[in-house]
Image (cartoon, rainbow, N blue to C red):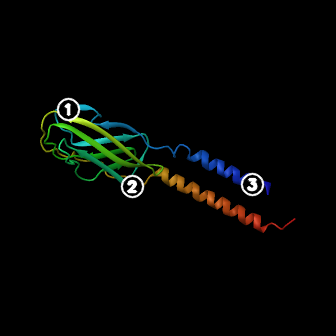
Amino acid sequence: MRRLIAILVASLVALVVSTGVAAAHAKLESMTPTDGSSMAAPPTKVVLTFSEPVGAAGTQVQVKSPGGTNVATGDVQVVDNTVTQPVGAMIEAGKYTVEARVVSADGHPITVAGSFTVTHAGHPATQPAGAPTQAEGNSSVVTIVAMCLVMLVVVALAVVIVRRRPAA
């Protein structure tokens, strides 16, 4: 019985230690155009870089003009820790706000916001050729799920071993 308890405690400790880093939420490291920046020519895309990979599912980015119109066009592209949102015509000069919602590797939604100013009314933006495509899956989530499944197998085996032992 002591051996069983020792195995269970060791398994729980291994599970907690191995998921400690993965349980941290992603944080916004940078935004292009830079938050608070001012530029004459409007950008063709907004790029958000996070401290860890984020999931493609549920990711939303809005880029709102000074008049409140969402100028984001096309699908948001998620590759590892980078989120790219193409933008359309920025025909208004003024402050554009960026609002994004992404899902961190641990499954928690993260909301970020920023802004930049376009000083000259723009022309229709063009999307660069060869833009990255959406990445499928998230290795951190897969690792956590796999560890949980391993833990369940260990517990099930411990229960079977205890039940098979003859009473002393």
Element type where label 1 sits in the image: strand
Mark 1: amino acid? Met
**Residue 86 x %, y %:** 24, 47
Task: Please give the residue where the numbered disc 2 appears in the rendered image.
Answer: 136
Q: Residue furthest right?
A: 168
Q: Residues within 10 Å of mark 3 (few under 14, many from 20)?
A: few
For disc 1, the neighbor class at 10 Å (few under 14, some 14 to 19, many from 20) is: some
Q: Nearer the viewer, residue 76 or 70?
A: 70
Q: Secondary structure at mark 2?
A: loop
Residue receiving disc 3: 5
**Can you say which quadrant of the picture contains the C terminus?**
bottom right
Residue 39 - label: 1
- Circle 2 Cα neighbour tier, 10 Å, few/some/many (<14 / 14–19 / ≥20): few
Name which residue type carries label 3: Ile
- Circle 2 or circle 1, nearest the eye: 1
Q: Position of residue 80 (x, y in %)?
A: 40, 46
